[in-house]
Amino acid sequence: MRASQFHLFTLKEAPSDAEVVSQKLMLRAGMIRKVAAGIYNYMPMGLRSIRKVEAIIRDELDRAGAMEVVMPIVQPAELWQETGRWDKMGPEMLRFKDRHDRDFAMQPTSEEVVTDIARQELKSYRQLPKNFYQIQTKFRDERRPRFGVMRGREFVMKDAYSFDRDAEAAGRSYDNMYATYCRIFDRIGLEYRAVAADTGAIGGDRSHEFQVIADTGEDAIVYCPDSDYAANIELAEALALQAVRGEARGALEKTPTPGKATCADVADLLQVGLDTTVKSLVLASDETDDKGEVVKTTVWLLLVRGDHSLNEVKAGKIEGLGSDFRFATEAEIIEHFGCKPGYLGPIGLRKPVRIVADRSVANMADFICGANEEDFHYTGVNWGRDLPEPDFVADIRNVVEGDPSPDGKGVLAIQRGIEVGHVFYLGNKYSKAMNASFLDIDGKPKHFEMGCYGIGVTRIVGAAIEQNHDERGIIWPAAIAPFEVVICGVGWGKSELVRDEATRLYETLKNAGIDVILDDRDERPGVMFADWELIGVPHRVTIGDRGLKEGMVEYQTRRDGEQHKLAPADIAAHVIAQLRA
């Protein structure tokens, strides 16, 4: 490829609405162009990197025994209605009607469609296991699309789906995909962690996220530096911070706390540690009838230590509360507690509520909580003496750095990450709902055991940039750089010697299978270098008239910036050796 024939269009400044580094650099490097909020054109420079990511994914999935299919972007409502997800999916799923008034959706994921394939195509246990995958455009109508390709509405994703005859075989398929993902991200050249994760709306009971380590990541990754324990913040287990409950030492007192509505303010006023206070959070769960009307509401009081925060995913797993909980209204709070938020607690309730204490709170003694009266808190509160034991004791908080690791092998650390892949074991959730079955060895029908496995293709490109950049631009992992090598011919229009030597090197590298671009624009060296540093091509060879007369050309790597002067006859071998190192 010659730069004069390529669409090369860079910007000195990113548009004002660009928020994160990857978005700014992709726009400046001419990789993407915004069409609408969360929707982008992928320009030639960006598409080259995307295609390289896809090629690595295809190669490894094919090696793992998966088979590529392409499922439609537009999917009929009937399939989604079979699993009940047509009504359960939120507004992120874009729904519309065709000219015949039939309901369709733009696919955010394809469990239903692939399960429909399986129930039509896979009839016998002899056909199993099977794994179908696609690399396809997805659409999710994000309420607030942002961060360029990191949280767009339209994006490219690889999704794979495995079908097995039993849980043991499905576990092997899961492990196979887990190992395949590790090979994919190793080949791409990303620093990542595989962390235990919540299964979320897709369902299932075994799940791992693949997180690219980046300070700008939206996700918090919890890990133990002294062991293999790793989980995302939603799933990371928080142990009780004291093994047993301490003895009650103080008397229960109703203490004035005028205008102090937060645990931090109360702790400052009373000159005690924030870890001696208890935070009250009031939730509600509704029971509905067949018409969707609320017939019963249960109010819940969740208690966490004042220096901790509620983990809503964990709270949604409390028996009876469920993931459809909501925060109670002010009217419901006043009805049950007799007080507005800010001074709430478990003592002296006006109406009964279900009380859930975090593990650490359940073992606290002489703690401080709201008195259900404005401007007052109770001090010296103790379970069993001053109030009944909680209805439930559960892990409902987010871990914090320094907490003990659940595996007992050290303490926890937290770093930021960007989720680029996710693997789930689904069980028979979808196959059972859609009556997708096969004849097992005993001749009886049995529902498939399924797994699903996603990789955000376009998101990988953004995540790679978030992890690899400097003040001059992108520093690509070589495997997904739009070009591996750029040859800069300085003084192209003036020197036949430069043109001949640059062309000779270009042809040599191209014939060796190197993805090389020859910058044959008649630009000033500063413009050339700034463009290619912004774009982030890993290896640069500069050929100028003066250097050639001295018997040398210049070689430089983008990552470390080191410059080496080499004889023209040696440069091709040197570049090839660097690429294959």
Image (cartoon, rainbow, N blue to C red):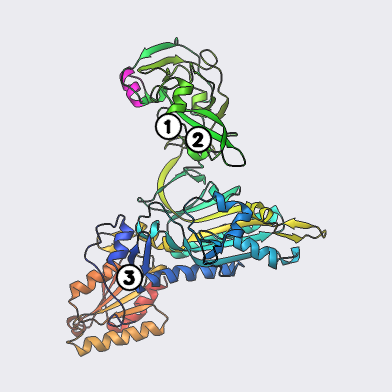
Q: Nearer the viewer, mark 1 or mark 2?
A: 1
Image mark count: 3
Mark 1 lies on a secondary structure that is loop
Cα separation, mark 3 vs mark 1, equals 45 Å
469 above or below 503? above
Q: Which element is circle 3 on?
A: loop
Q: How crowded is mark 2: few (under 14 residues within 10 Å), some or many (20 or more)?
A: many
Task: Give the numbered dot on residue 537.
Answer: 3
The percent position of residue 45, horizontal first and vertical second, equals 35, 72
* Left or right for 211, reference 255: right
Amino acid type, mark 2: Ala
Q: What amino acid does circle 1 point to?
A: His
Q: Residue at the location (36% across, 68% down)?
A: 41
Mark 3, mark 1: which one is toward the viewer? 1
User: Alpha-carbon distance for marks 1 and 2?
Assistant: 11 Å
Q: Mark 1 points at which residue?
A: 308
Q: Distance between the residues labelled 3 and 2?
A: 44 Å
Q: Nearer the viewer, residue 557 or 72?
A: 72
Magenta stretch: includes residue 269: yes
Q: What's the magenta region?
A: 264-272
